[in-house]
Amino acid sequence: MSKPQFHIWPMSESDAAAVCEWRYPAPYEQFRWPSWRAMTRDGKEFGDAEIRRRQYVSVCDEHSALVGYAQFFPMEGVVRLGMGMRPDRCGRGSGAAFARAIALEAGSRYPGAQIDLEVETWNARAIRAYEKAGFKVADRYSRQAAHGEVEVYCMVFGG
């Protein structure tokens, strides 16, 4: 079986609205986005057209079907990644290729920048995928998330 191929392009409004409809099973349900109506009303993340244009991309499969999204959040010398995969695609073995494609895209957009991400320490499935993609744990700390105070690993992409 060949490795999944992913294509990355600017996130459209229709893709953004579709992402807001995704519902994850427990224990991942906390990662769902508010409704598209709430996102646009509040100008939250990709609900704001300018933030969506600058930071968000759609990730599609070889048939151009939306399978995920990514955020490239530039900081001083670092690009912090955020990503999400469509719920029906999670847990099927393509997470590492998905994360690697996003990290390589970030590297091409921001040459010389360190590429990292944060992942909650309990999320073993995501951590395994990120490690297979070339990320390594660099730090552990607490931070505030939409669903409360969380312990996270900061993982850095090594190529």
Image (cartoon, rainbow, N blue to C red):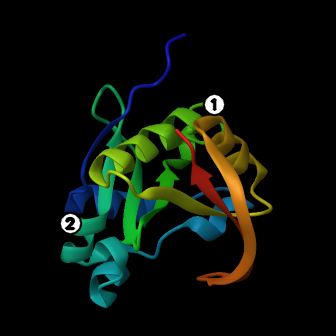
Q: Secondary structure at mark 1?
A: loop
Pick the residue in front: 26 or 51: 51
x and y percentages locating residue 138 in the rendered image? 70, 60
Considering only vertical position in the picture, is 8 above or below 120?
Answer: above
Q: Is residue 135 visible to us here?
A: yes
Considering only vertical position in the picture, is 52 above or below 123?
Answer: below
Inter-mark Cα distance, 2 to 1: 29 Å
Q: Quadrant of residue 129?
A: top right
- Residue in view at x 52 percent, y 33 percent: 97
Considering only vertical position in the picture, is 102 above or below 43?
Answer: above
Residue 93's tag is 1
- Residue in view at x 80 percent, y 61 percent: 122
Residue 53's tag is 2
Pick the residue in front: 95 or 110: 110
Pick the residue in front: 27 or 74: 74
Q: Is residue 151 visible to us here?
A: no
Considering only vertical position in the picture, is 33 above or below 157?
Answer: below
- Residue in view at x 59 percent, y 37 percent: 133
Which quarter shows the N terminus? top right
Q: Amino acid at mark 1?
A: Gly
Tell me whether circle 2 and circle 1 mark residues in contact (CB < 8 Å). no
Q: Secondary structure at mark 2?
A: helix
Mark 2 and mark 1 lie on one chain; the one further toward the N terminus is 2
